[in-house]
Structure formats: C-alpha cells, structure tokens
Amino acid sequence: MIAVRRATDTLIMLAVIVLAWQVLYRMVGSTALPAPLATLQYLAKFVPSARFAENAWATLVTFIWALALSYSLGLVIGTWMGVHRLSGAVGEPILISIYTLPKITLYPVVLLIFGLSLPGRVTFGAMHGVLPVALLTMNAIRNIPPVYLKAARTLHLSEWQTITTVLLPATLPEVVSGLRIGFTLTLLGVLLAEMFASKSGLGALIINAMQLLQNEEMVTVTIVLFVFAALANSFLLWMEHRLHKRI
C-alpha cells in the first residue's frame, strides 16, 4: 500500500513538472526552452549514440574517483575529529569556514597544480563532498551515548576495535546522511569542473550546448543527470530510513 502511494505521488509530481514545463515553453518560446515532446524525441535519439556514451563514461569515471576520495577522506577526518575532542574543537571552525567558501574560487589553484587533467577534475569534485561527510560523521560520533564508550573501555577494546564495533554501528544512520549529501555535492563539483576545464564529459556537453544554443541537447543531458541523481539519492535515503528503524 505504501509502495503504491509513493508511486502515485511520483507520477503526480512528474505530471506537474511536465505541465509546468509546457506552460513555460508556451511563455518563453523554443529559443529559450524546447518543448517537452521534442526534448523526449531528441533524448530517445541522443542517449543511445556513441557521442553521449563516450561523454557519460568520462563523467562516470571522474565521479567514481572523486566520490571514493571524498568518502574516504571525509570518513577519516570526521572519525578523527569525533574521537579526539581537541582536534574537533580546533578543526570544526576551520572546516565550516572552508565549507561556506564557494569552491569555484579555488578552481584556478586546482588548475595550476593539476592542469587540465583527470586528477584536477577528481580533486575539484572531491572538494565539494569531503566536508559534509566529515562534519556529519564528527557530529554523529559526538552524539554517541557515553555509556557505549564506557563499555568499550571496560572491555579493554583497542581504538580500532572501538571504532569498528562501537562507533561505526552507532553512527551509521547519520554517516549515511553525510554520504548522501556528499554524493550530490561531489557530482556537482565534477560537473562544474567539466564545464570550465574539460573537452569531455556531460558537463562539457551542457556548456557547449548552451554556447551553441542547442537547447534540446542541454535539457536532455540535464534530464539524464537528474534521473541518475534522483535514483541514487532515493536508494541512499531508503538505506538511511532502514538503518534508523533498526536502531
């Protein structure tokens, strides 16, 4: 029953989006925004093409490396700052200050270090995702009931055993929340990197389509990215809810 209701709500939401899209198209015209039907027809031709597959693969490879880097660094930094209170007290204001800084202002520095290469795009993408993962992981560890840590000390667990058997299970729902936010921001960072300094990737396709006024291609790539992000976030949100119910 819940699944049917969610499916119905999703269909209603999609219908509202398409209707709003059609109304906006009537208002601004095809020069600014393509019609929904024309876009879907273009999507059916463009997505199976070799050009789209090549650029989608380039984005996927960059995104996977950037996501792995942001997750690993974020979890390590967040765990360290959560376990060691002094490190957290000193490092949290610094991380928050960096988090509020628009990352695009740091992209020239990344380009100077890495150039127009895959490591540069990976680094810039990971810069967006690592901080929310680290901050939410740190806060999750800080909110663990003190009795858990007292029990670990009573059992004479090592620091690594405490992390794997106590901290990780207790903080997993909140950590997954950080991973979900990090996923979205890392994808955003990768696309921005491809828009400004890449000849391949979906971000490059979007910026090229904008410059050449190929609105159907631009909206088509945007739709593909939206569907990918929505499905991935839905899975992570479902996992997060399942973990909350188990606690």
Image (tube, rainbow, N blue to C red):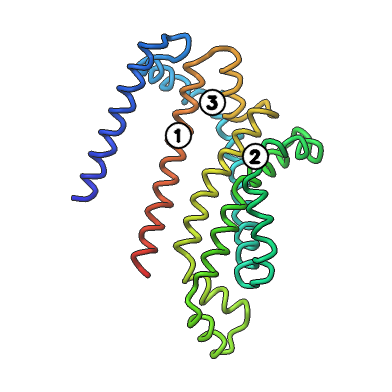
The answer to whether marks 2 and 3 mark residues whose Cβ atoms lie closer than 8 Å is: no
Secondary structure under badge 3?
helix
- The answer to whether 39 is drawn above or below residue 99 in the figure is above
Q: How many marks?
A: 3
Q: Which residue is mark 3?
A: 52
* Residue sitting at x 58%, y 24%: 205
Instruction: Give 86 or 214, whichever is nearer the viewer.
Output: 86
Q: CA distance from mark 1 to mark 2?
A: 22 Å
- Amino acid type of the residue that numbered disc 3 sits on in the rendered structure: Phe
Q: CA distance from mark 1 to mark 3?
A: 16 Å
- Amino acid type of the residue that numbered disc 2 sits on in the rendered structure: Pro
Horizontal arrangement in the rendering, residue 110 relative to residue 154 (left or right): right
Quadrant of residue 109 within the rendered picture: top right
Q: CA distance from mark 2 to mark 3?
A: 30 Å
Q: Which residue is mark 2?
A: 102
- The answer to whether 58 is drawn above or below residue 86 in the figure is above
Label 2 or label 3, whichever comes before in sequence order: 3
Q: Residues within 10 Å of mark 2 (few under 14, many from 20)?
A: few
Q: Quadrant of the C terminus?
A: bottom left
Q: Which residue is mark 1?
A: 226
Secondary structure under badge 1?
helix
Label 1 or label 2, whichever comes before in sequence order: 2
Q: Residues within 10 Å of mark 1 (few under 14, many from 20)?
A: few
Q: Position of residue 209 (x, y in %)?
A: 56, 18
Q: Residue furthest right?
A: 112
* Residue sitting at x 45%, y 34%: 226
* Residue sitting at x 76%, y 35%: 108
Q: Position of residue 97 (x, y in %)?
A: 66, 50
Q: Position of residue 101 (x, y in %)?
A: 66, 43
- Amino acid type of the residue that numbered disc 1 sits on in the rendered structure: Phe
Quadrant of residue 54 within the rendered picture: top right
